[in-house]
Image (cartoon, helix red, strand yellow):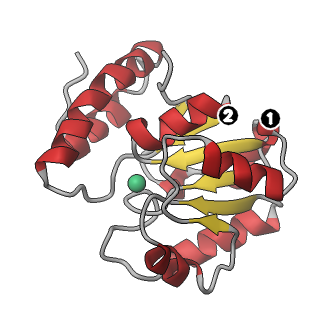
Amino acid sequence: MFGTPDYLFSSIYDITPNFFIKHGVSFVLCDIDNTLVTYDDITPPKELMEWFENMKKSGIGFAFVSNNCPERVEAFNRELGYPYIAKAKKPLPCAPLRLLKENGIKKSQAAMLGDQILTDSMAAASLGILSVNVPPIKDRTGSFFKFKRRIEKYFMRPYWKKHPDQGELCRLWHEKTGNKYK
Ligand SMILES: [Mg+2]
């Protein structure tokens, strides 16, 4: 289904450089909030810096594409120094596309990594690039967020149907989002 992620992981720390290499991906368009850290984390923790270092050693490049404000993204990215676009208006594909063009990356070499279907996976689907999702680290509790999460289940169901062996992951997703998939 359009917008259904291609791959799901329980956390970014389960994603290895080899996963990207195996799929021909050398450049990851990456969401920040609730994918890498919570909204409250201003800077990346040590283990996340090591995760990026490990990716870098294997030749995996990154760019941040966030709907959050420039101050947030700039502060988070200060030490990492990756290309980025803030206020990216995902799911519109303009910002991710611009990052690919500016960095000379073909769509076939790129993936989108995020936690939301309606922004991250939809942007990936519009671009026709690999969509990789993790569950939200700590969701906001506002009603708009809850509404968005409810809608996600319709896009997630085809994934769980295709991967009946991933019951453990499915349970984790249910815990994090409150969504039932059956
Ligand atoms: Mg997010």
Instruction: Give the residue type that dot 1 points to.
Output: Ser
Quadrant containing ligand 1 reads bottom left
Q: Can you say whether 43 is above or below 2 in the image?
A: below
Number of numbered discs overlaid on the protein picture: 2
x, y percent for residue 172? 29, 41
x, y percent for residue 126? 59, 30
Q: Which residue does the image show at 74% across and 43% down from the upper left?
A: 110
Q: Which residue does the image show at 61% across and 68% down from the upper left?
A: 51
x, y percent for residue 18? 74, 48
Q: Which mark is residue 108?
A: 1
Q: With 152 as the anchor, is 116 left or right in this view?
A: right
Find the distance from the CA under tag 2 to the CA under tag 1. 7 Å
Q: With 56 as the anchor, is 35 left or right in this view?
A: left
Q: Residues within 10 Å of mark 1 (few under 14, many from 20)?
A: some
| Residue behind mark 2 | 129
Element marked by disc 2: loop
**In this rendering, does residue 19 appear at all?**
no
Q: With 143 as the anchor, is 101 left or right in this view?
A: right
x, y percent for residue 47? 52, 76
